Image (spheres, rainbow, N blue to C red):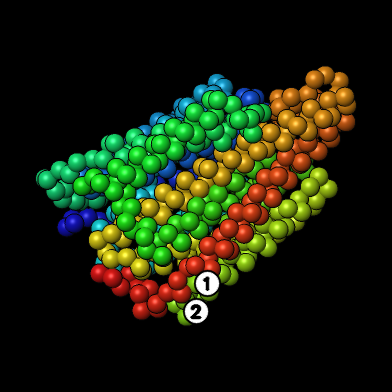
Amino acid sequence: MRGTKRPFVLAAILLAMFMAAVEATIVATIMPQIVGDLGQFSLFSWVFSAYLLMQVVTIPIYGKLADIYGRKRIFTIGVLIFLIGSVLCGFAPSMAWLIVFRCIQGLGAGAVQPIATTIVGDIYTKEERSRIQGYLSSVWAIAAVTAPFLGALLITYVHWSWVFWLNVPIGLISVVGIILFLKESVPKEKQPIDYKGAALLLVATMTLMLVLVQEQSFLQTSTFIWVLLVVSAISLFWFIKHELRTTHPMMTLPLWRRRTVWTINVGSLFIGAIILSISSFLPTYMQGVLQVSPLIAGLSLTTLSVGWSTSAVVAGKMMLKTGFKKTASIGAVALLIGASLYVLLHVTAQVWLAACASLIIGVGMGFCSMTYIVSLQSSVAWNVRGEATAMLMFTRQLGGVMGVSFLGGLLNARLATELSRMQTSFTEQPSLEKVNQLLNQQSVLPAAEKTLIANSLSSGLSAVFIAIAIFAVCIFIVNIFVPKGDQKTSSPAAND
């Protein structure tokens, strides 16, 4: 790629990664205010799930399109779609419309991380990639630390819409940088796109999500739910069968036969479920149950980010001496300890307990995630390393979507049960909309009813935190099967 101005291209990539990373965290901070303004608490989890779902299913598609039409064109299209969705989110008149606009955001977000990572692989040598990967990881850590504060400041002094509109200048600068300074030669030969595989994966995932988020009837075995489950299972089976037979698959399934690949991807599935669930539901616990300010709620997520970024650096150095298995095991133990502390959170818990639990969870995330990506890339040859990395991103994002959707449905079900049980204590028939009033800072609910609703919300979130602890146990079990790893293959050039 002669003529490419690498420092400027890297700066543009870092800006795009920062924008995407902030979006992944900041919305959780402002969700209580959004629910207070727009209502429909029962659709709470879909604000996250809609975005993540579209992002997940488009990651492998964007990767294929970038190989055919070039990184610059597809990256630019993806970022522009993301910015259009961001502008529309700020003008959302209802929760339903916000979910639609979040789908548009997610449709564009699927291009950012995989193509940005691919561009780095294109313009830097094997020896330089490990250093640049450190820069990319730092961006996610910085974004995770600053996003909760930024969200809290915006909703305190302006309006939650600005959380979405802030993406526009950042995204435009990134696009201009890529257009001006990235020079690439696109192959004239065009490969076919696996539209059928993409469509089957979309159907399988979407129908499963509809089952997981069923508002107050989460556990209801209705005919409609069974139909969705059957459609999801058939689509998944058809997708696997198609991918194994097609000449140009969207996802190379034979890679999953390798022990390193399947263990790390299964672990990443639960990693995604834990991190997105905490980011989605912890601010609601802090503001709805403990009745603290958005700024304090943001601090609880900031400690998680601090633990993650710090431990990732330590893990990167440690795994070269101790091997992948021991490093991942340290992370798994930290996740178990942190998740156990989350189970202790209730209506009388202290803020410091939530912050400490988040910090320890962050340490576990740093050790596990860094070990997973390095061991995966070290176990495959150069010609499939990009696809294997995209597969890891896909699996972690899918885990986040499924985790948030499942726990959102679980929370709705527990809330409905608790509010129904305590209906004689209310002046009027309680419903999930009472939670909207609790999360609205201008609420005029009587103090007694606020306490009752906070207790109900605490009961529902207790089930969520127990489920997160179960996810941590699953990661611990999966890490038993992670190969120890060979120190000689830890270099980026190892299998070239």
Secondary structure type for disc 2? helix
Query: Which comes before the other along the chain, label 2 or label 1?
Result: 2
C-alpha distance separating marks 2 and 1: 7 Å
State left or right for residue 35 relative to residue 453: left
Secondary structure type for disc 1? helix
Could you say where residue 165 lies in the image, as x and y percent from the top left? 48, 34
Where does the C terminus fall, quadrant-wise? bottom left
* Crowd rating for badge 1 (residues with CA inside 10 Å; few <14, some 14–19, many 20+): many
- Counting labels gives 2
* Disc ID at residue 327: 1
In this view, the residue in front, 200 or 279, is: 200
* Disc ID at residue 322: 2
Q: Which residue lies furthest to the top in this view?
A: 428
Q: Residue furthest left?
A: 188
What's the residue at 40%, 61% (across, down)?
261
Could you say where residue 55 lies in the image, as x and y percent from the top left? 42, 41
Disc 2 to disc 1: CB gap under 8 Å: yes
| Amino acid type assigned to the residue bearing label 2 in the image | Thr
